[in-house]
Image (tube, rainbow, N blue to C red):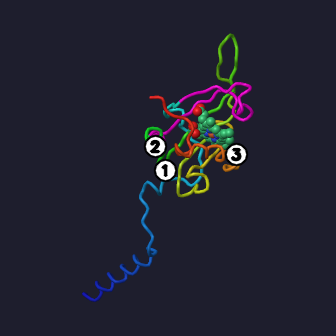
Amino acid sequence: MKTLLLSVFVTAFALIVSCTPPGRQEKTAEQKELPSEVLYPADYRSWTHVKSMVLEPGHPLYESFGGIHHIYANAEAMQGYRSGTFPDGSVIVFDLLEALRKDSAVSEGNRKVIGVMYKNSNVFTETGGWGFGGFSDQKGTRVQLDAKSACFNCHAGRKDFDYVFSSYRP
Ligand code: HEC
């Protein structure tokens, strides 16, 4: 009986050892949950509104970003706006709509694009730890883009604030 028990223990131990590659650290539950690509941020409209801005014709970025945009941040990204360092899991949304001028007022028109920055420093090592993505509608239709040339090269100028341009007005 004793020998049987002992051999069961030895087998179980050998199994555990063989399943754990040497030198590999167990990941925390939080790291495991983080996706490795930029996903459509389905509930961004309920996040913190950081700021809004209108780019008029004549602005150097009008061609790509002309119109009215609103910026939203999830809870992790809000920690970043306060501290200057955005933790993994931070998501920031750049919600761009046409700007309609009528009767001395500027109001929201059709959606142009939903730009997304998503921090996962283990995955997006070429672009400051941020993944950049674009969606053309609220169904999450993906816009094909080259994150480095279309997005990061410009955001790189904001290295001092973790590649984020906007700031949060309390
Ligand atoms: C030519 C420069 C430039 C390029 C290219 C650019 N951005 Fe930005 N982006 C900005 C600026 C400037 C802001 C700040 C706007 C504001 O303060 O309202 C910004 C803001 C953002 C924000 C809100 C967080 C922040 O940094 O303030 C997101 C998200 C974003 N951009 C995503 C993208 C994506 C995705 C692309 C590529 C498709 C892209 N950007 C390309 C200049 C750029």
On the image, the x and y values in percent for residue 160 come to: 53, 44
Q: Secondary structure at mark 2?
A: helix
Does 95 sit above or below residue 153?
above
Q: Residues within 10 Å of mark 2 (few under 14, many from 20)?
A: some
- Does the Cβ of the disc 1 residue fall within 8 Å of ligand 1? no
In the image, residue 65 lies in the stretch drawn in magenta: yes
On the image, the x and y values in percent for residue 41 come to: 56, 41
Residue 135 visible within the image: no
Q: Residue at x 59, y 47 (%)?
A: 39
- Amino acid at dot 3: Ala
Q: Is residue 10 left or right of residue 157?
A: left
Which stretch appears magenta? 51-78
Q: CA distance from mark 2 to mark 3?
A: 25 Å
Labelled disc at residue 88: 1
Q: Residues within 10 Å of mark 3 (few under 14, many from 20)?
A: few
Q: Which residue is mark 2?
A: 76
- Does the Cβ of the disc 3 residue fall within 8 Å of ligand 1? yes
Q: Residue at x 70, y 45 (%)?
A: 150
- Amino acid at dot 2: Glu
Q: CA distance from mark 3 to mark 1?
A: 22 Å
- The quadrant holding residue 104 is top right
- Nearer to us: label 2 or label 3: 3
Q: Which residue is mark 3?
A: 150
Q: How many marks?
A: 3
- Does the Cβ of the disc 2 residue fall within 8 Å of ligand 1? no
